[in-house]
Image (tube, rainbow, N blue to C red):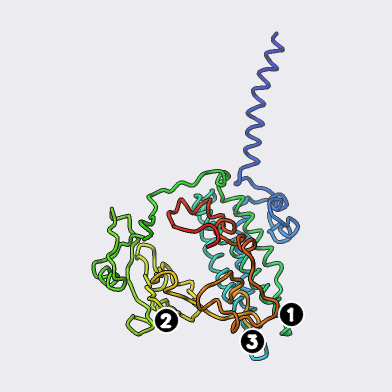
Amino acid sequence: MAYSKLIVASFFILVPLFASLSLAADNSSTPVSAGTICKSTPDPSFCKSVLPHNQTAGNVYYYGRFSVRKSLSQSRNFLNLVDKYLKRRSSLSLTAVRALEDCRLLAGLNMDFLLNSFEMVNKTNNTLSNLKADDVQTSLSAILTNQQTCLDGIQSTAAAWSLKTGLSAPNDTKFYSVSLALFTKGWVPKKKMSKTWKPTRKQRGFKNGRLPLKMSSRTRAVYEGITKRKMLQTETEDDGVLVSEVVTVSQNGTGNFSTINDAIAAAPNNSASTDGYFLIYVTAGVYEEYVSIAKNKKYLMMVGDGINQTILTGNRSVVDGWTTFNSATFEYNNTGPGSNTTSRVTWPGYHVINATDAANFTVTNFLLGDDWLPQTGVPYTGGLI
């Protein structure tokens, strides 16, 4: 009988011991070898070849910060290489120059994303909140997309210029992939994906198809004078979207600007959410321009006179020397001035896709909008119009 009791007692002692060992193995702060940590990355062999081996072990936070720093260095080197080639643009074709300019823009964005990501991971050795983790994951994922977009553009123009493999940077993409994997392992909450998102405060929604705005009496008078209609009154001080300034774009010279790009250029740089939105009201007309919003132009809001009233159109195509990144990729049964392809599409074999093919690119199918848009209050059409 005493022997039996001893067995039972030993069992209860061993259970907590095994549990503690299991928890220790899953603890992100526990030192592990580079080989072990690299098993959580898409390419363990490459990961092991670049992580430091000057110490016996480090934890996921140490390796994660190292990989982000290394990714930043790679991105900076790539940007310098692009600038080096652009200095010799006189010897390159127009398509090659445009592809390089795309790469310079994308590489610059990647550096910003990596700097912001490193600032975030350098602050803590703990998992981040869902919101902050999502921000960094989005940035690190965008870096991979930006790099591939750049390389695709270079590859498509390689036959037209001599630097066919000069910007090939397969290791850069691998570095970014390691950074994303290690960040996910160390800083992303383990149960983030299983939790249902709930807003922390009341969401600003549309009312009768219009978004309530909050602005000063002077700005309100300007807005109502432009739109010829009274603004919606907000129920509380926090219901409306704060607007700091309103400017107008009009082709007849009655507005503050005659082009949308000029209005964007006049917006303040690096504004904060507490400053409010810079609202650009674009009156009715067909605007033949390409709108490009620089990374330092934040919290812009553009409002038009309505569907088929304010129209933005252009005619860039790959055949004319534009990269896919800077041209329309496809369209479906457009109406109005932009639908005339006779002077725009210059290659044989183009055709209008049918409704079945087009349905793959609707809000419902392409963005899975039915799963998340309803909770935002934004009106939308899920299928074909």
Hey, what amino acid is under mark 1?
Lys
Looking at the image, is mark 1 or mark 2 nearer the viewer?
2
Q: Tell me the residue that label 2 is attached to.
A: 259
Q: Say if mark 1 contacts mark 2, CB within 8 Å.
A: no
Looking at the image, is mark 2 or mark 3 nearer the viewer?
2
- Label located before the other in sequence (1 or 2): 1
Hey, what amino acid is under mark 2?
Thr
- Label located before the other in sequence (2 or 3): 3
Quick check: can you spot residue 100?
Answer: no
Can you give x and y, in whole percent of width and height, for residue 80 in the image?
62, 78
Q: Tell me the residue that label 3 is attached to.
A: 94
Quick check: can you spot residue 49?
Answer: yes
Can you give x and y, in whole percent of width and height, for residue 278 in the image?
37, 70
Q: Residue furthest bottom?
A: 90
SS of the residue under disc 1: loop
- Label located before the other in sequence (3 or 1): 3
The quadrant in which residue 82 appears is bottom right
Residue at position x 56%, y 51% in the image:
187
Q: Residue furthest right?
A: 45
Q: Tell me the residue that label 1 is attached to.
A: 164
Answer left or right for 251 relative to 75.
Answer: left
